[in-house]
Amino acid sequence: MIERLSLPQARRIALQAQGLAKVRSTEPVTARAVGRTFARLQLVQIDSVNVVSRSHFLPFFARLGNYDRDLLATLSSSAQRKMMEYWAHEASFIRPEHFHDLRVWQSRTWVGSESMEAALRDRLEGEILELLGRSRPLTAREVTARIGHEEVSNKDEWGWNWNAVKRTLEGLFEKGAVSAAGRTEQFERRYAPTAKVLPPALRHDGDSSPDKSEAMLRLIEASALAHGIGTVRCLADYFRLPVRESAGAVETLVRRGTLRPASVAGWNAELYVHSDAARPRKAVARALLSPFDSLVFERRRLEQLFGFHYRLEIYTPAEKRRYGYYVLPFLLGENIVARVDLKADRQSGTLLVRGAFGEPDAPAHTAVELAGELALMAQWLGLDAVVVHQHGDLAPALAEAMA
């Protein structure tokens, strides 16, 4: 039986699933609250862009407000860690219980050592695994120094101009043999054998792997929980899984009653809603969303649900950008009502609003609410002030509200 929903109902289901439907608590944010938020999201994408803050910090700010970023280091480095790094949507923090399932479905061989000369790769893998097995977690630079590797100059730079040790480490990371035990202040991975990184209950003997079909079912169900509602393509995209196999898993979960077919007025697609998805009567959140926030992963879904067309313009030449370099959508209630191009100028201690743009149906109080959120973000980032540049139709009202 198909569940029939209105578009506002579908929006509220999606926001509730992502932890973006309620007013934030005014209580201090605890490690448990951060852990619960991460468990709800299932994964958080990692990106090196640091224009406002490292991207993996921003989804927690959107949902929790002013919190201590060191809590994430605790959750991702303790013996009973709740977060670990692996390939998922892209490079991501994932729940450790998903690691073995993702390992049988992820294939990012182009990132690491697949194209290296086999003899060199095999030698370096042996030396690296032996070293990491008896040492503390090490960065690629530290591994290079410890094994005494000297790079042969090559005029043809590869990828990010990594040396052979870094490429080999990333190949071992893709295979699941090594993992990131943490990051340095410079955002370098500190590598360790995966057996030392996984919580004890998840450490497998030998090279045992889960059944691929069962792994797919678990990942698609986790994706459905994080979505609340979505298409097969949406559910597959969350962990970057192949669509055809994802569709088979969706059919199985429908037969089991875990997922239910749904139709949404105005969204012309075959949709599925998780049987445990909450159906709130209203959504009252206020949040600035990172370009890498899981709510905005799937741009077509974002446009269908919110009528919000969004493209990341980091790689667009400056003169061709419509909104700016690092633009964050602004969620108010159950609608995305504006977007702002932000930069944290740490030298001057200011949060710069380089552009502010309202959506056509933005309510009259958008600028006031956005000003409040920007002030909170500046406080969270340890900045003293918010400076609004006069660029964009919302900028004058926002500057007045900030004043």
Image (cartoon, rainbow, N blue to C red):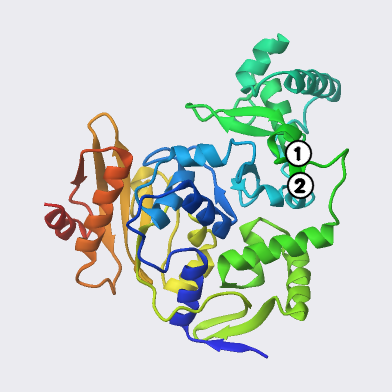
Identified by mark 1, the residue type is Gly
Where's residue 337, x and y in %?
32, 67
Q: Quadrant of residue 135?
A: top right
- How crowded pointer 2 is (Cα within 10 Å; few <14, some 14-19, many 20+) is rated as some
Using the rendered view, name the quadrant where residue 344 is placed: top left
Q: How many marks?
A: 2
As drawn, is 188 to the left or to the right of 165?
left
> Are the residues flagged by discs 1 and 2 in contact, CB closer than 8 Å?
yes
Q: Residue 310 in the image: x percent, y percent?
A: 43, 61
Of the two numbered discs 1 and 2 on the same chain, state the one appearing first in sequence.
2
Q: Which quarter of the figure has residue 283?
A: bottom left
Query: Whole-Å distance between the Cαs marked 1 and 2?
Result: 7 Å
Q: Is residue 94 above or below residue 381?
A: below
- Image: 400 above or below 261: above
Q: Position of residue 242 (x, y in %)?
A: 73, 60
- Above or below, comparing residue 208 to residue 12 in the picture: above
Which residue does the image show at 49% across and 37% down from the upper left?
48
Kindly identify the amino acid type of the residue bearing the numbered disc 2.
Arg
Q: Is residue 149 visible?
A: no
Look at 43% across and 40% down and name the residue there. Answer: 69
Give SS at disc 1. Answer: loop
Secondary-structure class at tag 2 = helix
Q: Position of residue 334 (x, y in %)?
A: 38, 72
Q: Circle 2 sits on which residue?
A: 103
Mark 1 Cα shell of 10 Å, populated few (<14), some (14-19), many (≥20): many
Instruction: Look at mark 1 in the image and give the residue it sits on.
Output: 176
Left/right of residue 72 with respect to residue 400 in the rendered view: right
Q: Is residue 51 visible?
A: yes
What number is the disc on residue 302?
A: none
